[in-house]
Image (spheres, helix red, strand yellow):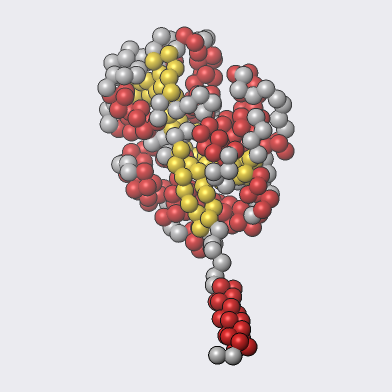
Amino acid sequence: MDKKWIIAAIIIVLVVITAAYTLQPKTEEVIRVGHLKDDHHSALFIAQAKEMYEKEGLKVETIEFNAGPDLVKAAATGQIDIGFCGTPPAVTGIAKGVPIKIVAAVNQEGSGIVVREDAGIQKIEDLKGKTIAIPMKGSIQDVLLQMTLKEHGINPEEVNIIEMQVPLMPKALEAGKIDGFIAWEPYVSMAEQKGYGHAIAYSRDIWKDHPCCVVIATDQFIKEHPDQLRKFLKVHVEATEYLNTHKNESASIVAEALGTDPAVEKRAFQNMKFIAVPTSSFIDNVMKFVGIEKQLGYIKKDLKKDDIFDLKYLP
């Protein structure tokens, strides 16, 4: 075969391959979303069940963590783009230089202190000398526990505070390995519903309408994917509205997502307030958390609202 024809044939093949590659749809960008195994992040589970992300053209991959501080560490190392976590871990992370911002609210209240029936505990003062489990030091439950202990004249060092994965807490309580725990829903309601223990205080008793979980996003994701963030938060608002208007159905959806009892979820939903767009009081209370965490020694530097929040991507 003539050399010219060989060269021409090669060129044609290369053109065809290039054209085919160019015409292929681009690989869809995956948003990596961190969350905990809890009811506070129900908006995420609703959005997935109702295929709300797909309707906005988003592909979401969820990654489960044991506690908020772990999730913030993952954001610091680029393992996630967006996360659902407690206010204290988010704020502490920002104070330590983790490049994240709070971009939306998630819920208010929704935690509780549960004690074993035979532990001889009826009030906060009875926690002195007892073994109480928290999800992790620096979690919102840790901060709330320390707040209420101090308010009742108890030095936290007078309580044996241990860390434990929240899903293990009810069974550990039943087995007598701990005297009590402070955790997020549905594990408070689960312990009560199953008869493992009873709540001596809900987080609303410690601090009514306190900000609990928030949505964080990494500075890199905010900068490089603002349109995706807007769509994600649009879904978050819609899912939160669905939660608040379809509570029984939502409880069943969340029960399926978490592998829990719908009856427990319906009970747990009574102890939470879902909110997506932060109100001025929500923001002010987050700043109050900053002051509390400074008192506890978790934060060393002063933070302003602009250091913490970037809410312009909310619908």
Would you place residue 41 above or below residue 155 in this image? below
Position of 85 with respect to 7 (left or right) is left
Q: Position of residue 160 (x, y in %)?
A: 43, 13
Question: Could you tell me if residue 137 is visible in this image?
Answer: yes
Q: Residue at x 47, y 33 (%)?
A: 67
The N terminus: image quadrant: bottom right
Position of 305 with respect to 187 (left or right) is right
Position of 264 with respect to 290 (left or right) is left
Q: Residue at x 44, y 54 (%)?
A: 48
Q: Position of residue 104 (x, y in %)?
A: 60, 44
**Quadrant in the picture for residue 99:** top right
**Quadrant in the picture for residue 115:** top left
Q: Nearer the viewer, residue 282 or 236?
A: 236
Q: Position of residue 97 (x, y in %)?
A: 67, 33
Q: Position of residue 56 (x, y in %)?
A: 54, 62
Q: Nearer the viewer, residue 188 or 298?
A: 298
Would you place residue 302 above or below residue 34 in this image? above
Question: Could you tell me if residue 86 is visible in this image?
Answer: no
Q: Residue at x 36, y 14 (%)?
A: 121
Would you place residue 33 above or below residue 13 in this image? above
Q: How many marks?
A: 0
Would you place residue 85 above or below residue 145 in this image? below
Q: Nearer the viewer, residue 34 or 256?
A: 34
The C terminus: image quadrant: bottom right
Q: Residue at x 43, y 58 (%)?
A: 50
